[in-house]
Image (cartoon, rainbow, N blue to C red):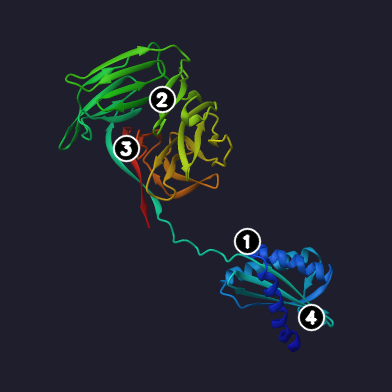
Amino acid sequence: MTGFRRNFLRFLVAALLSFASSATLLAQTPTEAGAELARRVVVRVGPGRNVVLTIRNLSSLKPADVSALFAALENELQSHGIRPSAEPAATTEIVVTISENLRGPLAVAQIRDGESEEVAMVPFAKPAKSPAAAPSLRIERKLVWDQAAAILDFGFTERTAGTISRLVVLGPDQVSLLGRTDSGWRSGASFPIPHRQALSRDARGKLHVEDNLFRTYLERTECAGWDEDPPRLTCSEKEDGAATSLYLTAGSTADVKFVPGRNFFAAYSGGEAAFGRQVQAFFSAAEVYEGVHLWNALAGADGRVKFFDQDGREGEAPTNWGSEIAGIKSECGSGWQVLATRASDASQPDAIQAFEVRSGQLVAAGAPLDVPGPVTALWTTETGRSVHAVVRNLETGRYEAYILTVVCSR
């Protein structure tokens, strides 16, 4: 073995000179380098042999990377019937040395079989340093209003840009405008919403507010309101199955159809967020970005999540989401998250979890936010910086309206 090790430098110099003529890396990771080196050893040694295998690390690689290379080397050798053995009776000796030069790490196998000696070498990329731990995410909630009657959505009017004037609360049968005081909101004007037929038990409704104007959307009725002195509201009925253009995601509309007597939408198509794709029967929708790549998630009425990108490709989505989801833009993580409820029934407290897109998959980010009852609505605001949530508190029986934001925490 002494002569064997002494000759290693001669073989290594020859190998390095050979490598210097090529700048192409043959492997990108220690694992790939170990497997490739084993395949080169097999060519020289042949399958079905017992060998004495030794490994040395003369590089700056971390022990975990060295272990990964060695494990891949052994696994690949064994797949060809070459069995590493500690028995000195083995006729073939292999010493694997991990070194490095200016170009990067090298895995070199010096093979001795009787009087013959050969060298196999694989250069590979040095593993990148692990990035600093990214800030974790936390969902914060702020209670805006609570009442005994059902809340479908809420928003804020502005008579003067940047100054909130009134809180608008949409219920199944009326729109309420609440005035702002130093101690909170106080009841103000309210307007009944006429219905040709009774709404579904868990009615779904959407509110859109722009400056001092607001519009409400229900199954068969659309209303337009003005926050003036005095405030006004006019409503009109629409035909069953007529499409409605709604802001379901931040900054873009989609054409949807309310299903009379049901609490979901019939279709989602034609809007910027739909990419010309039609999805049948869904409860809620969210846009989320992976870098500059846009993805869409929809909570289907069949309990499945539809998740696809701007090119129509299907992504991998969780299977345990509830019916309420919404997209949100933050300063944390990837910068965009989907807030989703969990699959549960209306008799149990709910939780809201943030998800991010990573390599085409929606993965959980941060801890879930527990809430005191089922979430009955999640709507992305027009800016996308917050989400409006409605929770039916199981202890009090009242409906609570929250503003949700995502903040960073370490």
Return the disc, 3 or 1, that comes first in the chain's sequence.
1
Query: In the visual, does 277 lie left or right of 203?
Result: right
Image spot of residue 10 (x, y percent): 72, 82
Judge whether residue 237 can be spotted in this image: yes
Mark-to-mark CA distance, 3 and 2: 21 Å
Quarter-of-image position of residue 369: top left
Which residue, given by chain and number where applicable, does mark 1 sit on?
Answer: 28
The residue nearer to you, when weighing 210 against 387, is: 210
CB within 8 Å, label 3 to label 4: no
Mark-to-mark CA distance, 2 and 1: 48 Å
The residue nearer to you, when weighing 386 against 346, is: 386
Which residue, given by chain and number where applicable, does mark 3 sit on?
Answer: 402
Q: In this view, does 194 lie above or below 54?
A: above
Return the disc, 3 or 2, that comes first in the chain's sequence.
2
Return the disc, 4 or 1, that comes first in the chain's sequence.
1
- Look at discs 3 and 2 and give the one toward the viewer: 2
The quarter in which the C terminus is drawn is bottom left
Mark 4: give few (<14), some (14-19) or many (20+) Cα within 10 Å. Answer: few
The residue nearer to you, when weighing 400 against 362, is: 362
Q: What residue type is labelled 4?
A: Glu
Query: In the visual, does 148 lie left or right of 221?
Result: left
Mark-to-mark CA distance, 3 and 1: 48 Å
The quarter in which the N terminus is drawn is bottom right
Which residue, given by chain and number where applicable, does mark 2 sit on?
Answer: 246
| Label drawn at residue 87 | 4
Residue at point 57%, 42% (across, down): 316
Q: What residue type is labelled 3?
A: Tyr
Image spot of residue 390 (x, y percent): 35, 34
* Secondary structure beneath label 2: strand
